[in-house]
Amino acid sequence: MASLVSCGDEPDGKWDKMKWKNLSGLAKENGTYVVPADGGTYAFECKNYSAPWLSGILADGEPVYYPGGKQDDFHSFTGDWFSVLCDHATVTVTIQPLDEATDNRSLNVGVTAGDIFDSIDFVQRR
């Protein structure tokens, strides 16, 4: 006898899409938040799930955080030029200033709340 276990009562694909409130007023362009060259700290509140956590992070298209990796902290991660913190319903992302040798870079922060997944995407450029 086989059984399936889910993180909730809803069948796969029936969870409401994550709804985010941009607490920092960061501008969005084509679905991606645009970070100024001098960086900053930006907060996003999930309005319909109380405690999302990290599901993966891509920096410049390369995986730097993924479930099952060496990380055992699903709520925070610090990369070479950014950090991410999931604290209850708020995801806070800090991006360092661009150095002189870098024209632009991208960051994709994957989040989950069980059977629902979403991402918050950033591009930083001069």
Image: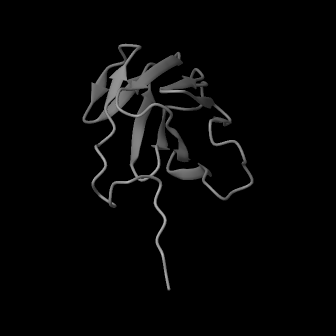
In the rendered image, residue 76, in percent from the top left (x then y), is placed at 64, 34
Split into 4 quadrants, where in the image is the C terminus? top left
Q: Nearer the viewer, residue 84 or 3?
A: 3
In the rendered image, residue 15, in percent from the top left (x then y), is placed at 31, 49
In the rendered image, residue 33, in percent from the top left (x then y), is placed at 36, 28
In the rendered image, residue 13, in percent from the top left (x then y), is placed at 29, 58
What number of labels is visible?
0
| Picture layout, residue 8 above or below residue 83 | below
Which of the 4 quarters of the picture holds residue 75? Answer: top right
Does any portion of residue 37 appear in the rendered image? no
Q: Residue at x 37, y 18 (%)?
A: 26
Residue extending furthest toward the bottom: 1
Does any portion of residue 1 appear in the rendered image? yes
Q: Residue at x 24, y 35 (%)?
A: 30
| Picture layout, residue 72 above or below residue 21 | below
Q: Residue at x 55, y 32 (%)?
A: 102
Its colouring scheme is one colour
Which of the 4 quarters of the picture holds residue 46? Answer: top left
Q: Residue at x 28, y 36 (%)?
A: 31
Looking at the image, residue 46 sits to the left or right of residue 66; the answer is left
Residue extending furthest toward the front: 1
